């Protein structure tokens, strides 16, 4: 018996051959696909280690992908043939795979090795519209430390945190050094301000971390510009839906407009991206945190 990730394990009643239990194979313990398997049962959603008996069989997913009118195996050891080069037009899945791979600092070769697929197929997937099999997506998600749902773009229009809570969560305070590391060099965070009409507001902004200051670009009459010359709260967080864990960092401190022309030019040169909101946003605001706190939630045994 051999299986791939994503295949279905079916246990039948010996007398009638009717399925009495089935589940998705979500973990392999041997590279050749032989038992035992980690199986997520469809009736309980629980994952257990299974040594299949004579009343069990594997329902294989389709592991072949149509490429250039031919079927190829994305998990084959040999490199697959790739269709003739055309204008690159990666699909959404390919874009998400490429972004996650770069965030992890992984080469295509290393990612392909971890996902047990040919590097040429991974290159094709990242550079051309493609519809990889469920099994290929499961292996890619595991290799990239993300979920199949995230690679497919599911839940993009929903707030994070709708997954199941951990059975035994552990909430831990983060020290200042951990908070600085999680802030990293740049990203998207939220700034809490009092707007011009006196109402509270929370606005997402693209930010940079420069010399321990949090800086962002905005327009002079925007809501985010209301942060200037006031004390503000700035928050960044991350939620891992697949593992039901995450972290948040809160920085509190005075905000001011960067007025020195040389400093403004330096910030523009060092910026990792332009503001996602678009438009002319040349006003730089700097937050000097006087308080930096954070929390991380994980399983109790981690």
Image (tube, grey):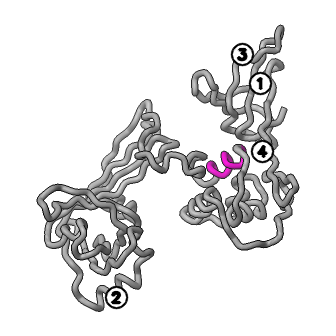
Q: Earlier in the sequence, mark 3 or mark 1?
A: 3
Left or right of 227: which side holds 86? Answer: right
Q: Earlier in the sequence, mark 1 or mark 4?
A: 4
Q: Which disc is residue 265 wearing?
A: 2
Q: Nearer the viewer, mark 4 or mark 2?
A: 2
In the rendered structure, does residue 31 fall within the stretch colored magenta? no
Say what secondary structure mark 1 lies in: loop
Say what secondary structure mark 4 lies in: loop
Q: Earlier in the sequence, mark 4 or mark 3?
A: 3
Q: Nearer the viewer, residue 199 or 138?
A: 199
Q: Which residue is mark 1?
A: 52
Q: Which residue is mark 3?
A: 20
Q: In the rendering, at what x and y percent does residue 168 appear?
A: 42, 32
What stretch of residues is rendered in magenta?
A: 135-142
- Seen at 43% across and 39% down, the residue is 162
- Seen at 81% across and 18% down, the residue is 55
Cα–Cα span, label 4 and label 2: 53 Å
Q: Nearer the viewer, residue 80 or 132?
A: 132
């Amino acid at each position: 018996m051999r299986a791939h990730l994503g295949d279905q394990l079916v246990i039948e009643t010996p007398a009638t051959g009717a399925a009495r239990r089935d589940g998705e194979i979500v973990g392999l313990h041997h590279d050749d696909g032989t038992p035992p398997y980690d199986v997520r049962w469809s009736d309980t959603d629980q994952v257990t280690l299974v040594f299949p008996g004579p009343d069990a069989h594997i329902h294989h997913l389709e592991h072949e992908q149509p490429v250039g009118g031919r079927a190829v195996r994305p998990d084959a050891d040999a490199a697959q043939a790739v269709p003739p080069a055309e204008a690159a037009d990666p699909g959404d899945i390919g874009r998400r795979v490429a972004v996650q791979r770069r965030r992890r600092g992984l080469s295509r070769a290393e990612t392909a090795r971890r996902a047990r697929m040919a590097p040429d197929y991974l290159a094709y997937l990242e550079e051309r519209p493609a519809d990889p099999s469920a099994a290929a997506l499961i292996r890619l998600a595991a290799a990239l430390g993300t979920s199949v749902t995230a690679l497919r773009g599911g839940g993009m229009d929903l707030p994070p945190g709708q997954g199941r809570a951990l059975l035994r969560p552990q909430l831990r305070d983060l020290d200042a050094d951990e908070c600085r590391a999680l802030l990293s060099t740049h990203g998207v965070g939220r700034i809490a301000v009092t707007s011009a009409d006196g109402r509270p507001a929370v606005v997402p902004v693209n930010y940079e971390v420069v010399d321990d200051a949090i800086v962002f670009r905005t327009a002079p009459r925007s809501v985010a510009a209301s942060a200037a010359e006031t004390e503000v709260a700035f928050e960044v967080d991350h939620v891992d839906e697949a593992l039901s864990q995450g972290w948040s960092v809160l920085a509190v401190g005075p905000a001011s407009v960067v007025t020195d022309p040389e400093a403004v030019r330096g910030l523009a040169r060092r910026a990792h991206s332009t503001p996602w909101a678009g438009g002319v946003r040349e006003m730089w605001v700097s937050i000097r945190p006087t308080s930096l706190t954070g929390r991380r939630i994980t399983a109790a045994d981690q």
